[in-house]
Image (spheres, helix red, strand yellow):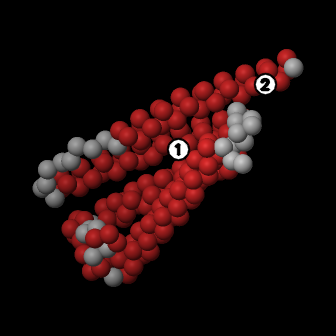
Amino acid sequence: MKTATEKILNIMLVLTWIAFIGLMVEAGIILVSYVITCIKPEITKNLYLGAELSKLMQLGFWNYSIKVYFMFSLLGMKAFIAFLVIKTLSKVNLANPFTANVSQRIALIGYVLLATWFVSLLNHIHANWLLKQMGQPEVDYAAVEFLFIAGLVFIISQIFKRGVELQAENELTV
């Protein structure tokens, strides 16, 4: 019979798979839309999820390409984080949860979250520059949530690291 924790972890694993697949599909749609708009630029008026990037295309193809690159990169990084969570949840053994592998994966998730924050910050800087070029007011958004979550995940990874050390010490004393 499974414990409540095992059930919750299995539910989280299924939800993470759904998020991973959704993020990969969305990233693929962005990439396919970009390729199609390279062939037929007039399609930029009606992109996926109603994204209207025709004004951006008028500013220049490179600005449009950079914006799409940021959109694709952020979705790809989020999907990679979901993939790492899937790998971590798949490796967790509740009888012996503190393993070096799990600790390393949690630390890697923190580093990828930090990199996602940085890419999101670059996207914000580029977007504000574009808004300034188009004569529109700048938007205040710094993607602080990625930085905050990266800090939390880093703290959890340090707790897991210490748990691995304690578990190794206990195995040596028995």
Q: Nearer the viewer, residue 43 or 80?
A: 80
Residue 157: where, in percent of width, then height?
59, 32
Indicate the amino acid at tag 1: Val
Relative to 13, is 46 above or below? below
How many C-alpha atoms fall within 10 Å of the one at disc 1: few (<14), some, or many (≥20)?
A: some
Residue in view at x 21 percent, y 68 percent = 55
Tell me how far mark 2 sits from mark 1, CA to CA: 28 Å
Is the residue 123 above or below the residue 165 in the image?
Answer: below
Q: Give the residue displayed 30% in from the left and 79% down from the top.
A: 43
* Residue 163 in the image: above or below residue 49: above
- Can residue 101 be seen by looking at this rendering? no
Q: Which structural element holds mark 2? A: helix
Verify CB contact (< 8 Å) between mark 2 and mark 1. no
Taking 87 as reference, is 146 above or below it? above
Q: Quadrant of the C terminus?
A: top right
* Residue ranking furthest to the front: 1
Q: Which residue is mark 2?
A: 168
Q: Is residue 10 left or right of residue 111?
A: right
When asked about the image quadrant of residue 52, the answer is bottom left
Sooner in the amino-acid sequence: mark 2 or mark 1: 1
Q: Is residue 55 left or right of residue 148?
A: left
Element marked by disc 1: helix
**How packed is label 2: few (under 14 Cα within 10 Å), some, or many (20 or more)?**
few
**Residue at image x 70%, y 39%?**
94
Q: Which residue is mark 1?
A: 112
Frontmost of labels 2 and 1 is 2
Q: Is residue 90 visible from the viewing direction of this image?
A: yes
